[in-house]
Amino acid sequence: MNEARRLHYLDAMGIRVWRLRATEQAPLQAGAEIARKPDASAMPAVETPAEVVPDLDRPATPPASSVTTPDRADAAPRDAAPTDVPPRRSDTPTASPAADPRQSGPSATSAADATTAFALNEEPPPWSEADLDGIPMEADPGESDSVPFAAAPDSPPAPDPIATMDWSTLERTVAGCRACGLCERRHNTVFGVGDRNAELMFVGEAPGQDEDLKGEPFVGRAGQLLDRMLAAAGLKRDQVYIANVVKCRPPGNRNPNPDEAGACRAYLLRQITLVKPKLLVSLGGVSATNLLDTTEPVGRLRGRVHAFGPDRIPLLVTYHPSYYLRSPAEKAKGWQDLQQIVKLL
């Protein structure tokens, strides 16, 4: 089947064939030339108002043998198209907008084709690979070749200078400490007293009025009772080491609050590290709360051996000596705890 018949047949069947508008004339003129010749196998012509649309799949330049030039004597007039050739909307091709001279190759051709399609008020052809080549595509995050941003590792915390201090440096630092509001009313800081290499270390709560004036822990009435308890167990004050959770006296001898205890915690930990005791004894609830990080009362904590710190130092909890001064009938509990202390040494 010749080209004109093929296009006519496809158009009658409702099949649209896209062709370049600019190159439409030459193939149709060639088809008209061929259509003049009788064709025994030709199908009867069917009149249809459908329009032959440009065929994008056909080459822009028809074969030289099938083109009829206008200067030949036997050239068919433009208005004398055979009846079996579908009528065209216009004999004059619609001019396409001038292509961007910077574009060349398939992309420029695709742009011209799309413009022609819209000029015919028809649906444009589907996108080709050449059309997609020049369009930037969003990269798939899963297929990206870029190296993901690596978060900088957290810098190690700055070393605590208190953790490396010797005894003299530590004592001077405590004397000049102004980490909390207790420093405003103090007379003296209360650092600690006793054997700095002792096997037994006592930790109290906070200095009282007598301790604040003298700068030494457990020198008031509670301290005197502690001395007598130690003597009953065959120990002297200078054979043990005694310190407090906080180094300054709270107003009115109240219990230190968590912020005040936290401000002095590094000092106490360094004292324990330097002494390296074989046994720790917590005197009172404030001391037990800060050493064991617990809210249990002393009555539930006493009688058991606890472990303190990374070295798992054995720790016993007993009442503060001031408790026995307020409740003399409870002194028997203090004696029981003292006997357990001696057994663990």
Image: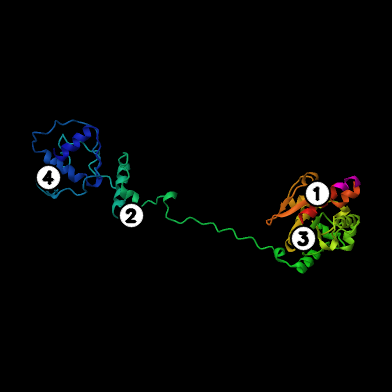
Q: Is residue 105 magenta?
A: no
Q: Rate crowding at label 3 as few (under 14), some (14 to 19) or many (20 or more) other CA atoms within 10 Å.
A: some
In this view, the residue in front, 45 or 302, is 302
Residue at horizontal 37%, vertical 51%?
135
Distance of label 2 from label 4 (alpha carbons): 36 Å
Task: Give the residue pinned by disc 1.
Answer: 285
Q: What color scheme is it?
A: rainbow
Secondary structure under badge 1? helix
N-term mark: 1 or 4:
4
Q: Of the residues shown, which amino acid type is indicated by label 4?
A: Ala
Q: Position of residue 244 (x, y in %)?
A: 81, 57
What is the spatial separation of the Cα atoms under label 3 and label 1, in whole angstroms?
22 Å
Q: Which numbered marker is on residue 199?
A: 3
Mark 3 or mark 4, whichever is nearer to me: 3
Viewer-nearest residue: 300 or 185: 300
Quadrant housing residue 43: top left
- Viewer-proximal residue among 289 and 124: 289
Q: Amino acid at mark 3?
A: Glu
Segment colored magenta: 328-332
Q: From the viewer's perspective, is the residue at label 1 or at label 2 nearer?
A: 1
CA distance for labels 1 and 4: 120 Å
